[in-house]
Amino acid sequence: MSIGLDIGSKTIKVVELSFDGDKATLKAAGAVGYKGINIPEVEDKKSFVDLATAIKKLFSEAKVSSKNVSVSLPESQVYTRVLKFPLLTDQEVASAVKWEAEEYIPIPLKDAVIEHQILERVETSTPPQVIVLLIAVPRKLVEKYVSICTMAGLECVGVETELMSAVRCIAPPGKTVVIVDFGAKSTDIAIAKNGELFLSRSIPTAGDALTRSVAQTLGVSGPQAEEYKRAYGLASGQLEGKVSRTLAPVVESIAEEIKKAIQYYQMDLKGESPTSVFLTGGSAGLPDIAPLFTKLLGSEVVIASAFSRVSVDDKSSKSLANFAPLYPIAVGLALRKD
């Protein structure tokens, strides 16, 4: 069994998979809303008690059988950078990354957990290059997530960034695609090539910003604005288009950030144009949001299928259908096979 635990800003998701060779089968899945806390800023472990209790309850209700979990870290707290080196050996790359890391990571190296991943070796370039993804996270943040798992009676066996998990779940092999994780507090943008994360970016404009826009423009309460957003979204024919017109400028600003990420990827990494954009996250299910992004980006935009690489029985498939955008990170974590 392999378990992915995704602790979002407003919901907690868990997925348990079993494996027969490379074939993954869904054994359990569940999600629960909770009063989110800002884990990176919380210093008192007592504040994690309610969160740990919510995780315990979720595991019980979802009938998760194992206690070993992999967890994801919020993209906004992660430092990633693509580095280019001459055509070095793996060992030489590891040494070079240590030297380069200090320049790109804005915290002392002793306070960071640093990993790297060789993305590709380009022998046809002039000069030949090896492309490396540098990933660093604050050590204290990792310790907090491990502590939360321990308080929930779980054993944390793996940690990675949210977008690495999403890429593993969604990105098709042999293609270059954009993945947009449209959450509550942040929108995280990834560009993946051949199933590997090449570029990541996190912006603080997301679902909560959409809700605030509706509340301020229509003069309604936050909960009412959330209901309007969920019910009408970007559908211009609903409620005389009032909600759609309110949300559109925020979505347009996010689309501009996606374009900037694509342009950077094409110019700095000489990457080819992405063939598709996959939307995921809690705000990806808003009515007519994919067609608007398609128009704004001039590219095919689809809602990601979290369980496309997992065998799911009919009953579970029906119950999860409306919540699929919530699960790619948890599925991607479980696909690690930790």
Image (cartoon, grey):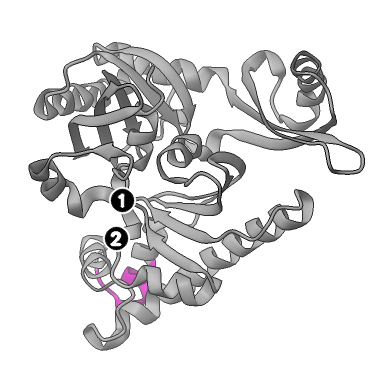
Secondary structure of the magenta portion, mostly?
helix
| Residue shown at the point (47%, 68%) measured from the top left | 300
Give the labeled residue for mark 1: 325
Give the labeled residue for mark 2: 285
From the top left corner, tell me how far across and down residue 298 is, in percent: 54, 74
The correct choice, above or below, for 4 with respect to 95 in the image is below
Identify which amino acid the numbered label 1 is placed on: Pro
| Classed neighbour count for the residue bearing mark 1: other residues with Cα under 10 Å, few (<14), some (14–19), many (≥20) | many
Q: Are marks 2 and 1 in contact (CB under 8 Å)?
A: yes
| Residue shown at the point (68%, 57%) measured from the top left | 272
Q: Earlier in the sequence, mark 2 or mark 1?
A: 2
Residue 175 visible, this orientation = yes
Left or right: residue 286 compared with residue 128: left
Left or right: residue 211 compared with residue 42: left
Q: Which residue is at the far right?
A: 127
| Residue shown at the point (72%, 57%) measured from the top left | 266
Q: Which residues are magenta?
A: 213-220
Q: Secondary structure at mark 2?
A: helix
Closer to the camera in the image, 23 or 250: 23
Alpha carbons under labels 2 and 1: distance apart: 7 Å
The correct choice, above or below, for 196 with respect to 182 in the image is above
